[in-house]
Amino acid sequence: MEKDTLIEELNLLWEPVRPYLARQIEELYTRRDGHVLEIGPFSGTIFDLVQKGVGQTFMIAAFPQAAIRSCQHEPESWASKAELKSSKAIVR
C-alpha cells in the first residue's frame, strides 16, 4: 500500500502543472476534434483537456494500479463540481 500512497502524492504534486501542460497541448494541436490518449503513471492532464473542449473521445492508459484507481475517481469529482461533462470521460 505504500506504493499507492506515493503515486497519489506524485499526482497531487503534478496537479498544479496540468493546466499548463493542457494549454501547451491545446496551442500545439490547434484543433478541437480528435481522440486523446494519455499514457503513464501520472495521468490527469486529460481532464484539463476535457475541460478546455480539446478532443472528442478520451482514453487513459495508466499504471500502476494506484494510478488507475486515482484516475477513476477524478472524473466523478470534477463532474460533481459541474466542471466536466461526465459523459465525455470514461475511465475503466
Image (cartoon, rainbow, N blue to C red):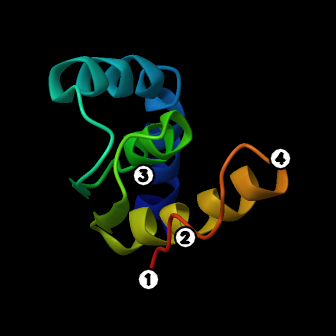
Residue type, numbered disc 4: Lys
Q: Determine the secondary structure under disc 2.
A: helix
Give the CA separation, mark 2 to mark 3. 14 Å
Badge 1 is on which residue? Answer: 92
Residue type, numbered disc 2: Gln
Horizontal side, residue 77 vs residue 23: left or right = right
Give the CA separation, mark 1 to mark 2. 7 Å
Badge 3 is on which residue? Answer: 7
Residue type, numbered disc 3: Ile
Horizontal side, residue 25 vs residue 9: left or right = left
Give the CA separation, mark 4 to mark 1. 21 Å
CB atoms of marks 4 and 3 within 8 Å: no
Of the residues under marks 2 and 3, which one precedes in the sequence?
3
User: What percent of the width, then of the height, locates residue 92?
Assistant: 44, 83
Residue type, numbered disc 1: Arg
Badge 2 is on which residue? Answer: 72
